[in-house]
Image: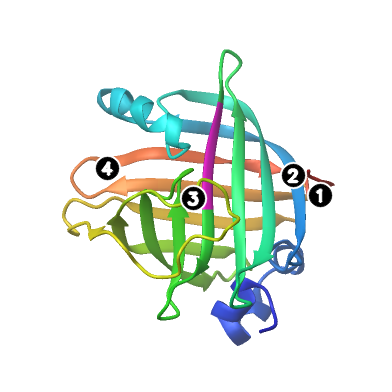
Amino acid sequence: MTGSLYERVLGARYAGLHPRVQAYFAQSAGTAVRYDGVFDVAGCTVPALRPVFAALAGEQMFFPEYGERVPFSIVNRAYRDDDGAPCLAAERILDFGHRTRRFTDLCRLGADGLLLDLVGAHHLLRTGLTLSVTAAGSMRLASTTAWVGPPSPASSTPPAPRALPGLRVPRVLAAGAYTEQGFDDATGRFTIQTRVVQPMLGTLFVYAGSFDPTPHRAP
């Protein structure tokens, strides 16, 4: 199998991405890189939910803080699973000053070819994703289905199962995640924004900002 995870899913549409975005998502298997930036806003937007998000913070899924101008780093680790399929594990590290928070996920192909996002240190939340390319050449990701299930290994190696274990969350209860990542030629920086939206409660969680395009080798 050749090509990155996102190249395989998008196919010919991949060429419509901004060249810098193409290069970002084409990270070679067996490499780990870090990017540094600042989120204009980041965190939980609903005060009543902060105790719930505090309980989930240990799983590196969400966190209760909300702040502006939050420095962050993102570490991407690309590898191939035992079947040779491409995977990308990401760790976002946010500095709120008084506390550092982490938000981790692992993107991979499911058994039926669906793009999966396994969220948190033990992948308790799994979502199916659709990918699209905007007119400006940004990558857009939107969740379509969500499952919750038993813990899987805490690290990206050995890889998490490719199947879809767990309980499907009813659509009326599930929160959708929407991410758009692009490149701003005027500033020379990557842009990213993510929103987690629940139909009845609105936006629950957000991070949006930009980061320097220079990759640094990560351990």
| Whether residue 79 is situated above or below residue 1 in the rendered picture | above
What residue is disc 4 on?
A: 202
* Mark pair 3, 1: CA separation: 27 Å
174, 121: nearer the viewer:
121
On the image, the x and y values in percent for residue 117 come to: 46, 59
* Mark pair 2, 4: CA separation: 30 Å
* Tag 1 secondary structure: loop
Please name the amino acid that badge 2 sits on.
Answer: Tyr
| Whether residue 216 is situated above or below residue 10 in the rendered picture | above
Is 61 left or right of 82, judged from the image as shown? left
Q: Nearer the viewer, mark 2 or mark 4?
A: 2
Residue at the image position 76 percent from the left and 69 percent from the top: 19
* Tag 3 secondary structure: loop
Residue at the image position 49 percent from the left and 50 percent from the top: 153
Q: Quarter-wise, where is residue 145 in the image? A: bottom left
Residue at the image position 19 percent from the left and 59 percent from the top: 171
State if disc 1 and disc 2 touch (CB < 8 Å).
yes
Q: Which disc, if any, is residue 153? A: 3
**Colour pattern:** rainbow
| Residues rendered magenta in the picture | 101-105
